[in-house]
Image: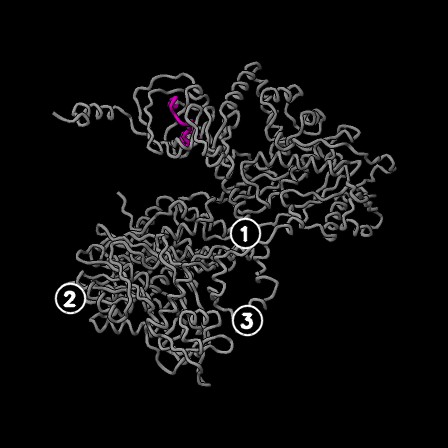
């Protein structure tokens, strides 16, 4: 017998059922019953209304790998060949055996039991283009209409009954007309958008009054048919639905005798935090606009003068300007001789210009609603200019005749194919010159507004260079997600770097905001010393009551509304506020200095000739390479800037070189019987006895008070100003000699235990015994150790004895120098994924790229606009961050970064676009890692290549790769320091610059192995250089070049290295000397990253 739940027949049936299923599908984030409620499920009243999904609503889900819809929204429902099981969030499952067709889409699964109608984003994207409006909607572009999935809470939902109704109406109505009538209706519908969303009557007038040349054969009936078939554009409704106002008495122009005489009605328009001076001329009915920064008399006067000048150029004379009683306008009354500035009375407003401003705003809102990307603040003035240009195309009832203000003013009729074939925000490719080269002949741009000249030119915004261009030749393209992403990115970056204050907030409202009471948690830290008060001298600071009332000092940059960029230090972050973690860290540091390590001795007075250093305190939050919080760490440091450095000639201490670390990792990667461990020595410097004459330190009042609170016995030692004086018994951080004293102390200890330091890198200590080789790598007070288990315990014991408190971590996965090291399966995997995330977090709008740069990366456009100082500093900072990354785990980006490093002091918009391409590549490869496998042999190989005259100043570029046993341990890409006259000279310079480094690596590897290794091989792809350095001879241009030839010949004659010819296709350093693309870059990147491909 057996239990029922273990019946073998049931288990067999279940197995057969599972085998019959195609697969188990997942609907992530759409399958939680407590979140998504439909009409026949019990509704949880605690659920946000925004998260409830109705039976006629459909979600667009980028986490779903299938689509499932309720049957009432589908056609042609039938049984599927196989049943499928669908798993979702919360463990809920469905078994579905029916499919149906969603009109205008594709076959989907059908089920009455689904908790929500779900469309798979990827399936829709395969069928139709999709635009994304940040935080608002996804728009699916069907051939004849758009479907908008609007954001509700965290979901993107479309009301499908409206979609179905519209779809049925359009299809049924189109069927009532001929194909030609439908095509003309579509053409008329497109004209509505391209002409700035005029009303039906205005559009009919535009088509019939003859102001537009080459107008297609569109009739009044075609326009009305377009409205009947496709309805009123939703953008028109969103932009123009307003409250009606009573009309006012208008000015009578018939009182003027000269028809050239004009009267201006002028006022200031506010829209989207921007201001514009708007003028309407009468009887011409022409609208003029100028962007202004403020409403001062000088600014408005300059703008008004530009309006007057525009009219004068066409022989129109302004006799009177009607303005409201604003003080700035009143100040202009005597500025324009011969022109009357008519200032209205209190609360008067200028009706004619107010009506025009309303129409400008109507058009502005319509067009803004139609563009699929977020409008940057700098594009507001362009959209206003476009809106005004569209209004000037339309004739009004105020004119005697059918001619538009634009035609009456210029005497030119705009051409339909030039003027109305585009709308603001359209993506176009504009002509960029024809040359006899492979350079692209067009650049991607966004249409802004027509310039109104005889050639029909438009002003465009270049997406690639982020600058204005004027062109008369273009091709209209379909707007893609890449274009919308780029424009959204411009808006996001501009919002972060050039934030404009909101002018709509009244001063009275600002003053009405009550002051926020201080938080109680902040009060208890009020007497704590400032964190990170490095350069501040508060020697004369009084009590808080004596502080100036002006508030904290702010830089001009912050006062201007510009946010400071995030600063990323190496695995640390300086604390800006006080909290429980920082308080504990400060108290622990004080306790360590005065009690545990006895590093400081408080004194009442010091000798008159004694050296007294000031002190500072810093608190940092430390992170692991994975991004996880490590600890809060406080450090009291002495200000050693006042010390006489000539008294300490031997004050510097070495730190571990990155290539030494990678060489050691490759050495141990394939070995067994070793443990990897990391040691952090607590308070390393302050465990080192101070030498030489006594040095004293002063603690400022706030920090001294904190010391006295912990150790009341020091209260009598307080000075008159509240500070404390103390003698340094140990080497305090910040002292000039501290780092060297610590390094000498640590290395002396290791030497006494039998370890030997490398002459090429003294931070690598080695000891061999019984056929085993142990290594200790030193980076200040962080040690990385490779040793047997027994030796590891021995090291722990003697370090604990010498330094009391140490932290030792023994693992195959450690964080060291900002890198995460994983040792497994004979390979070290090195990553800095968290660091990459920090770099690209502000650049998520950029499109992903498959390579870090283009082949023309090193070419410069002298006409490119320099970046503002603020943007240049941001450029500099970002390049420095990526350089730190590329020198460690991302050598595949090093070539592009090395070029960008030459541009940090003179960056242009072209350089910015190159940086953004590099950032797009990092976004695409943010989890890419470096792999260091075990050495297959002991042969050191050096690949050295040079690209002749690659830089704009005609200097060449050198690429270097060092390989040991098949493992890349060093990559360099750098601009040459001297000028080379030929490719041969460039290769000679690159070779001789790095021969010394080849010898140093050979010496270091011999030290590591404990025995001499084979002579290094240097690969060169230039036969003429090989001839020069092996045979000699030749004609050298200068004494300098002759010295380089003899330097190389001596090296190879003495067999310190061997030079071997390498075909260019096999030159591994080719990608480090120039930017590659396509398959060439892929092969180079895989090689330097240690990625093995089939």
- Tell whether position 120 is magenta: yes
Q: Residue at x 34, y 59 (%)?
A: 817
Identify the mark nearer the N-term, 1 or 3: 1
Q: Residues within 10 Å of mark 1 (few under 14, many from 20)?
A: some
Q: Gap between marks 1 and 3, in whole Å?
A: 35 Å
Q: Which residue is mark 1?
A: 497
Instruction: Read off the magenta span.
Output: 108-125
**Mark 1 secondary-structure assignment:** helix
Q: Quadrant of residue 370?
A: top right
Taking the view exactly as shown, the residue that stands out farthest to the left is: 1
Q: Residue at x 40, y 16 (%)?
A: 76
Q: Quadrant of residue 955?
A: bottom left
Q: Residue at x 42, y 28 (%)?
A: 119
741, above or below 85, in the image = below
Q: Which mark is residue 1086?
A: none
Q: Gap between marks 1 and 2, in whole Å?
A: 60 Å
Q: Which residue is mark 2?
A: 769
Q: Gap between marks 2 and 3, in whole Å?
A: 61 Å
Residue 445 placement (x, y as % from top left): 55, 41
1036, above or below 191, in the image = below
- Tell whether position 330 is magenta: no
Q: Which residue is mark 3?
A: 541
Taking the view exactly as shown, the residue that stands out farthest to the top is: 176
Answer with left or right where residue 382 lies relative to residue 12: right
* Marks 1 and 3 in Cβ contact (< 8 Å): no
Q: Quadrant of residue 256?
A: top right
């Amino acid at each position: 017998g057996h239990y029922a739940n273990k019946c073998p027949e049931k288990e067999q049936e279940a197995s057969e059922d599972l085998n019959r299923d195609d697969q188990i599908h997942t609907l992530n984030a759409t399958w939680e019953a407590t979140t998504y409620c439909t009409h026949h499920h019990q509704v949880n009243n605690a659920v946000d209304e925004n998260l409830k999904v109705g039976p006629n609503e459909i979600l667009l889900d980028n986490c779903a790998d299938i689509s499932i819809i309720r049957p009432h929204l589908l056609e042609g429902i039938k049984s599927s060949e196989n049943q499928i099981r669908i798993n979702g969030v919360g463990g809920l499952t469905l078994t579905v055996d029916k499919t149906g067709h969603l009109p205008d889409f594709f076959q989907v699964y059908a089920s009455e039991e689904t908790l929500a109608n779900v469309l798979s984003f990827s399936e829709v994207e395969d069928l139709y283009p999709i635009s994304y409006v940040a935080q608002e909607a996804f728009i699916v572009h069907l051939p004849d209409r758009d479907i908008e999935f609007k954001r509700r809470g965290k979901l993107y939902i479309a009301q499908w009954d409206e979609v179905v109704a519209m779809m049925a109406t359009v299809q049924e109505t189109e069927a009532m007309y001929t194909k030609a009538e439908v095509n003309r209706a579509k053409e008329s519908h497109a004209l509505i958008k391209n002409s700035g969303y005029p009303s039906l009557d205005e559009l009919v007038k535009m088509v019939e009054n003859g102001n537009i040349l080459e107008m297609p054969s569109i009739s009044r009936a075609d326009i009305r048919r377009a409205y009947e078939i496709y309805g009123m554009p939703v953008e028109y409704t969103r932009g123009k639905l307003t409250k009606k106002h009573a009309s006012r008495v208008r000015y009578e122009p018939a009182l003027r005798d000269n028809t050239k005489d004009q009267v201006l009605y002028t006022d200031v328009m506010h829209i989207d935090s921007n201001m514009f001076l708007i003028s309407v001329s009468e009887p011409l009915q022409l609208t003029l606009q100028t962007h202004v920064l403020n409403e001062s008399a000088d600014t408005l006067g300059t703008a008004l003068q530009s309006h007057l000048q525009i009219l004068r150029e066409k022989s129109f004379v302004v006799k009177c300007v009607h303005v409201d009683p604003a003080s700035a306008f009143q100040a202009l009354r005597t500025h324009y001789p011969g022109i009357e500035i008519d200032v209205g009375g209190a609360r008067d407003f200028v009706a004619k210009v107010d009506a025009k401003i309303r129409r400008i705003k109507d058009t502005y809102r319509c067009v803004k609603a139609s563009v699929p990307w977020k409008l940057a603040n700098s594009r507001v003035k362009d959209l206003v200019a476009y809106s005004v240009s569209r209004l000037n195309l339309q004739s009004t009832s105020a004119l005697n005749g059918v001619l538009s203000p634009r035609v009456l003013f210029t005497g030119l009729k705009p051409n339909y194919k030039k003027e109305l074939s585009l709308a603001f925000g359209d993506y176009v490719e504009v002509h960029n010159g024809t040359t006899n080269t492979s350079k692209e002949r067009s650049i991607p741009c966004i249409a802004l507004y027509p310039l109104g000249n005889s050639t029909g030119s438009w002003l465009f915004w270049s997406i690639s260079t982020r600058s204005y261009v004027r062109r008369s030749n273009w091709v209209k393209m379909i707007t893609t997600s890449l274009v919308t992403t780029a424009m959204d990115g411009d808006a996001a970056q501009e919002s972060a770097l050039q934030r404009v204050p909101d002018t709509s907030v009244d001063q009275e409202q600002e003053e009405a905001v009550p002051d926020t009471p201080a938080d109680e948690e902040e009060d208890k830290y009020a007497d704590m010393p400032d964190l990170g008060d490095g350069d501040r001298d508060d020697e004369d600071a009084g009590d808080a009551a004596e502080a100036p009332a002006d508030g904290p000092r702010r830089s001009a940059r912050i006062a201007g509304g510009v946010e400071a960029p995030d600063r990323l230090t190496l695995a640390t972050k300086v604390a800006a506020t006080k909290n429980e973690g920082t308080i504990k860290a400060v108290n622990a540091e004080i306790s360590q200095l005065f009690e545990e390590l006895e590093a400081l001795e408080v004194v009442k007075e010091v000798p008159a000739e004694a050296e007294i250093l000031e002190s500072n305190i810093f608190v940092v939050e430390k992170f692991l390479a994975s991004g996880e919080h490590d600890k809060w760490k406080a450090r009291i440091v002495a200000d050693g800037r006042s010390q006489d450095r000539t008294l300490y000639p031997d004050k510097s201490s070495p730190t571990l070189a990155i290539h030494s670390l990678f060489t050691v990792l490759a050495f141990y990667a394939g070995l067994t019987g070793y443990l990897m461990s990391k040691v952090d020595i607590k308070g390393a410097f302050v465990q080192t006895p101070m030498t030489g004459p006594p040095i004293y330190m002063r603690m400022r009042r706030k920090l001294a008070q904190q010391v006295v609170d912990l150790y009341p016995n020091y209260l009598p030692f307080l000075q008159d100003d509240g500070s404390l004086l103390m003698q340094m018994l140990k080497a305090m951080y910040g002292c000039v000699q501290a780092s060297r004293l610590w390094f000498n102390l640590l290395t002396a200890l290791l030497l006494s235990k039998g370890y030997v330091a490398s002459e090429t890198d003294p931070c690598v200590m080695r000891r061999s015994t019984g056929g085993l080789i142990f290594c200790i790598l030193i980076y200040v007070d962080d040690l990385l150790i490779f040793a047997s288990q027994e030796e590891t315990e021995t090291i722990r014991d003697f370090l604990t004895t010498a330094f009391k408190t140490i932290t030792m971590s023994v693992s195959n996965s450690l964080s060291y120098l900002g890198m995460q090291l994983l040792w497994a399966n004979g390979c070290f995997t090195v990553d800095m994924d968290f660091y990459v995330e920090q770099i690209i977090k502000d650049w998520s709008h950029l499109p992903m790229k498959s390579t870090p740069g283009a082949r023309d990366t090193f070419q410069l456009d002298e006409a490119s606009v320099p970046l503002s100082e603020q943007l240049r500093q941001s450029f500099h900072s970002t390049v420095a961050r990526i350089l730190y990354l590329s020198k460690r785990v991302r050598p595949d980006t090093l070539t592009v970064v090395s070029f960008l490093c030459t541009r940090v002091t003179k960056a242009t918009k072209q350089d910015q676009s190159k940086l953004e391409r590099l950032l797009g590549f990092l976004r695409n490869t943010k989890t890419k890692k470096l792999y260091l496998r075990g050495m297959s042999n002991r042969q050191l190989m050096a690949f050295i290549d040079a690209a002749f005259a690659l830089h704009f100043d005609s200097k060449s570029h050198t690429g270097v790769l060092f390989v040991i046993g098949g493992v890349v341990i060093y990559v360099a890409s750098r601009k040459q320091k001297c000028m080379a006259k030929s490719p041969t000279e460039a290769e000679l310079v690159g070779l001789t610059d790095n021969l010394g480094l080849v010898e140093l690596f050979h010496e270091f590897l011999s030290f590591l192995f404990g025995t001499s290794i084979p002579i290094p091989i240097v690969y060169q792809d230039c036969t003429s250089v090989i001839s020069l350095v092996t045979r000699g001879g030749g004609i050298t241009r200068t004494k300098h070049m002759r010295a380089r030839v003899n330097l190389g010949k001596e090296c190879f004659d003495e067999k310190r290295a061997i030079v071997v010819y390498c075909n260019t296709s096999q030159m591994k350093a080719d990608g480090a000397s120039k930017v590659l693309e396509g398959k060439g870059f892929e092969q180079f990147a895989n090689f330097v990253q240690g990625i093995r491909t089939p």
